Image (cartoon, rainbow, N blue to C red):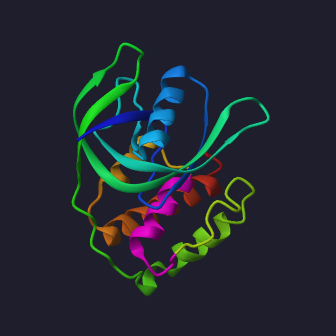
């Protein structure tokens, strides 16, 4: 299937919520088409040269005309997609052939990662995050890892690596290492 692409300097996981302000004509047209057809688009991490070839298919859950005149939408991640044969239309919109990646196995959060559960709960209190998620399943390792990867201040390439993991428990293990590194840098004053 062919999907329109929305390259952004971020990573969104299935279940992730992404508020966007749309102003470029090519993306306004894309959103209009998606809303008319009930179709979706793929958010993929932008890079200096191009974009990642694995992204997240998102659907539009809500939209509103914002006070600044822009179109505001809430996109929600649905599934991971492998992208092939990217091409650009005359209006600048990127398209790619897309195939669903094998869904991750469902796994419960082991007790050793309960500190990450508490970290995510504390992140939800931040004003930029508050109200975005009201239904997180803290027992689901995939959801816990996805939300933490989206919200924590990791480098984008690292977030993309974590996004492409196929095992949610391995991702949690890596996130725990990254959090420890962040804490160490903070104590050293190098952050």
- Which residue is depicted at the point 54% across and 28% down? 28
- Which residue is depicted at the point 65% across and 64% down? 123
- Which residue is depicted at the point 51% across and 62% down? 147
- Which residue is depicted at the point 45% across and 69% down? 143
Give the side of residue 14 with respect to residue 137, left or right.
left
Q: Is residue 109 above or below residue 180?
A: below
Q: Nearer the viewer, residue 154 or 190?
A: 154
Q: Nearer the viewer, residue 104 or 38?
A: 38
State how many labels appear.
0
Residue 12: x and y in percent read 46, 50
Quadrant in which the N terminus is drawn: top left
The part of the image, by quadrant, that contains residue 142 is: bottom left
Q: Nearer the viewer, residue 182 or 168?
A: 168
The part of the image, by quadrant, that contains residue 90 is: top left
- Residue lying at the far right of the rendered structure: 67
Residue interval drawn in magenta: 137-152
Q: Is residue 125 above or below residue 95?
A: below
Residue 3: x and y in percent read 32, 37
Q: Is residue 50 above or below residue 18?
A: above
Q: Is residue 140 above or below residue 20?
A: below
Residue 45: x and y in percent read 41, 38
Q: Nearer the viewer, residue 39 or 23?
A: 39
Residue 49: x and y in percent read 35, 23
- Residue lying at the far top of the rendered structure: 90
Is residue 47 in the magenta section?
no
Magenta stretch, overall SS: helix
Is residue 142 in the magenta section?
yes
- Residue lying at the far front of the rendered structure: 36
């Amino acid at each position: 299937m062919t999907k329109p692409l929305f390259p952004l300097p971020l990573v969104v996981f299935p279940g992730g919520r992404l508020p966007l302000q749309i102003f470029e004509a090519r993306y306004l047209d894309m959103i209009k088409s998606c809303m008319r057809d009930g179709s979706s688009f793929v958010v993929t991490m932008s890079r200096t040269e191009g974009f990642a070839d694995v992204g997240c298919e998102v659907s539009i859950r809500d939209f509103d005309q914002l006070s600044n005149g822009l179109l505001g939408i809430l996109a929600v991640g649905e599934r991971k997609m492998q992208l092939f044969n990217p091409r650009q239309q005359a209006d600048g919109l990127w398209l790619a052939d897309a195939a669903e990646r094998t869904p991750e196995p469902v796994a419960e959060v082991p007790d050793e990662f309960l500190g990450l559960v508490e970290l995510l709960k504390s992140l939800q209190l931040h004003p930029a995050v508050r109200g975005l998620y009201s239904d997180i399943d803290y027992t689901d390792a995939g959801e816990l890892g996805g939300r933490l990867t989206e919200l924590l201040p990791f480098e984008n390439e690292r977030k993309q690596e974590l996004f492409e993991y196929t095992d949610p428990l391995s991702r949690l293990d890596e996130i725990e290492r990254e959090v420890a590194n962040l804490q160490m840098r903070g104590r050293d004053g190098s952050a």
